Amino acid sequence: MIPLTWLALALALGLFSPYAATVNRELLNRLPPGFSEDQVLISRAMRRQVLLGLDVGAREAVARESKTLTGVATFQQKHVIAHLRPEASLQQATEEVRRILGDRTVRVFPIRRIVLGDSSLLSIIWGAVLAFMFIRGVIMVVHEPRWWRYRLYEFANLALMALLLTLVFGNVNEALEAADRDGHGLSLSATAIWGLGYLVLLGGALWWWRWDVRTRCRQCVQALGLPLAGGEEGSMLLDTPRVERVCFQGHGALTMDRWHDDWRGYKDMWDAFSRPS
């Protein structure tokens, strides 16, 4: 039921959020309507790529003298947007604009880098993580075919949780940017608090995912129960504290200690009574 919960929450955010269209477009890595892949943005950029913009005179000079750019126009009042000629590169355009304006702080950015937010980058990172987990799951299933349900649950749970976390990130980011566009201001402290809060949320979600996956049967994926504590709290090596949980379907028992998990599968449910814990 846990993956279905993540799926329901993700669908609710993806369909009914006021920022759903923008966030979904960023997750799919698609440019907004009215933009094309050959467009670039020209602006003065300081350290950490803080864009300062260009004045009207600079825009007119670029439109008049540039051989690598066409369709030069104003973008968001203080920047310049243009189309990059097919035979030109970003580096050539940057060097030409710097020569025209005599300013080494001017840079030319692909428009995709400007209009697509951090949600697009986050979705790419999650995609890489999920690709690794998928390959790992396939290898583990080949090694132990009986655990295929467990590996499928592990991957599906992580994938749907990643989708939900990415949608949450995108919607909150878009809400903050909308407040900035409406003139309410986007304070640095609010952005920092949201960034730290998201890291805490991400860490808590991953911890919960790992705990949920650890405490499930390797064959039927049901939650293990009847926890039985053992060992000594003061022991570091020989008799470390441990908890044993069993599958209610009789598939096996899991012993969890501070160092590792040990799963013991049973041929039938009565096999558990013939083995010491």
Image: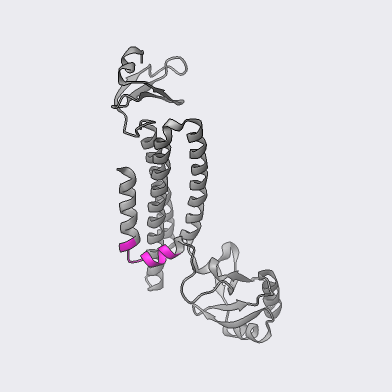
Q: Position of residue 85 (x, y in %)?
A: 65, 77
Is residue 224 in the magenta section? no
| Viewer-side residue, 47 vs 111 | 111
The residue under the point 52% across, 49% down is 128
Q: Which corner quadrant holds the N terminus?
A: top left
Q: Position of residue 21 (x, y in %)?
A: 38, 67
Left of 93 or right of it: where is 258? left
Is residue 21 in the magenta section? yes
* The image quarter in which residue 174 lies: bottom left
Q: Which corner quadrant holds the C terminus?
A: top left
Left of 54 or right of it: where is 233? left
The residue under the point 48% across, 60% down is 120
Give the answer, above or below, for where 220 lies relative to 61: above
Is residue 185 among the parts visible in the rendering? Answer: no
Q: Position of residue 185 (x, y in %)?
A: 40, 69
Give the magenta-colored segment's residue range. Answer: 15-25
Give the answer, above or below, for where 94 lies relative to 234: below
